[in-house]
Image (cartoon, grey):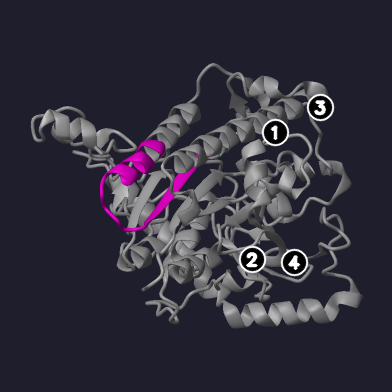
Amino acid sequence: MPRRQPNILILMADQMAPRVLKAYGGKVARTPNIDRLAERAVVFDNAYCNSPLCAPSRFTFMSGQLPSAIGGYDNAAELAAQVPTFAHYLRQAGYRTVLSGKMHFCGPDQLHGFEERLTTDIYPADFGWTPDWTRPDVRLDWYHTMDSVTQAGPCVRSNQIDFDEEVVFTARRKLFDIARDGDDRPFCMVVSMTHPHDPFTIPEPWWSRHSDDEIDMPRVSAEEVPLDPHAKRVRLVIGLEQQSVTEDQIRAARRAYYGACGFVDDQIGSILSALDETGMSEDTVVILLGDHGEMLGERGLWYKMNFFEGGCRIPLMIAGPGQFAPGRVSNAVSLADILPTLVEIAGDGTAPVYADRLDGRSLIPHLTGQGGHDEVIGEYLGEAAVAPIVMLRRGSMKFVHCPVDPDQLYDLASDPDERVNLAADPAHADTVAACRAEIAQRWDLDRLHAEVLASQSRRRLVADALTKGVQTPWDHQPHVAASQSYVRNHIKLDDLEAMARFPRVTSE
């Protein structure tokens, strides 16, 4: 008899830095549900996004391919409908695929293989946020500002609370629907919240879960490390040159961020409780991950958009009851590895066949204690860049290269805060030469630069044109069949109530 394919539940937090979590050494944030998940999971200590920006990171997560391979350069780039995602592969393997929450899809395809999408997205689906590398000194009005930090503090309500509460409510209800509806297919459900992404504001009781005196401050100040050219550009983009930030504002922003992590933890607890209540926990692989990190004032920087550890390192935990023994993996892995991992989990034991060359590799060897790769390849092609920025991470070494900037090389074993750039050190000349040779083999950076500029130009034209006359938005509009909801006359009342009750009452 063939084995039962496990359900897959993916819990995604936006802009969650792993170092704030207890499982990664954090001592401030209170996240008991994530802590309990970590105890029964394989925890990846060195997991990374492949592009430290929401949309391109998520496109790589979905497709297993780097942004340059699929044109997913920035937060207004389109993920082409022809690009296979893990939702396509799993749906082909017999899964029902469900998305609740954010995925930052741009363009008319807002499903990308998901059979159902329960909510709209918190961000627009158009090309309005297209960067312009030809005007590096111009701050566009949709860029981050430092208001998130200078206005940090408690609130009664926020846009993000509205969104995440809907995301979690619809996800919980869908889990109960799956338990009741008689469809025996396994499911893959992605629940993607927008917290703890800025702005740094959070309601009670999460704000008061911490006091000012327990909030740790950044480990590395702006004055302690050189300001590299890309960091200068990031400072311009986020408005740091227009607004100074006080120590009290930094503390308030970090306190709100920790509170938002607590909010996310409560939502995760609620979803996992629903999984328990439906009796599906033992048949479900649970994956917790983030799309990128958060600098939180380290090096005087905020948000992401760089390859420092704060910006690109993510939490990743995979718990599979009866499949994967709890443990820790120190190897460097990335979001590009999720698609081949999911396809292998959902498979029948034969080698998967992919429609495209993937940039990721399966994590199954890591999950089963058989070793595995130790490599992350990264690209950044979004705002604050003026040319492609690429990254190689193997072992303890991280190399960052941009044709218009000085190289950066860090040994994370001896220098986890990346204070000392070793790229100009003669003792590391061979490493730098090898990395540059590999980059020249992997990328044609001049061609990629031209492709990004051409894409930006096309999208700016399309975005402007589509504001004229009658506008047809691409934003996902969730469909609710009211005539099939709750009590209607399409089913006899007693039968309907019996079907909706969980667990079913059976007559003896």
State the residue in front, 449 or 224.
224
User: Along the horizontal axis of the image, is 157 left or right of 375?
Assistant: left
Q: Can residue 274 be seen from the camera position used here?
A: yes
Residue 193 falls within the magenta-colored stretch: yes
Q: Which residue is mark 1?
A: 30
State the residue in front, 486 or 144.
486
Residues at circles 3 and 2 in contact by the CB criterion of under 8 Å: no
Q: Amino acid at mark 2?
A: Val
Choose the circle earlier in sequence order: 2 or 4. 2
User: Along the horizontal axis of the image, is 148 left or right of 96?
Assistant: right
* Disc nearest the viewer among 3 and 1: 1
Q: Residue at x 34, y 38 (%)?
A: 503
Q: CA distance from mark 3 to mark 1?
A: 12 Å
Q: Residue at x 21, y 29 (%)?
A: 486
Q: Quadrant of the N terminus?
A: bottom left
Q: CA distance from mark 2 to mark 1?
A: 26 Å
Q: Which residue is mark 2?
A: 333
Q: CA distance from mark 2 to mark 4?
A: 13 Å
Q: Which residue is mark 4?
A: 398
Q: Amino acid at mark 1?
A: Arg
Choose the circle earlier in sequence order: 4 or 1. 1
Tell me the magenta residue range.
172-194
Residue 189 falls within the magenta-colored stretch: yes
Choose the circle earlier in sequence order: 2 or 1. 1
Q: Residue at x 69, y 82 (%)?
A: 437
Q: Can residue 142 be seen from the camera position used here?
A: no
Choose the circle earlier in sequence order: 3 or 2. 3
The spot of residue 98 in percent (x, y) is: 35, 50
User: Along the horizontal axis of the image, is 489 left or right of 424?
Assistant: left
The spot of residue 330 in percent (x, y) is: 74, 64
Choose the circle earlier in sequence order: 3 or 1. 1
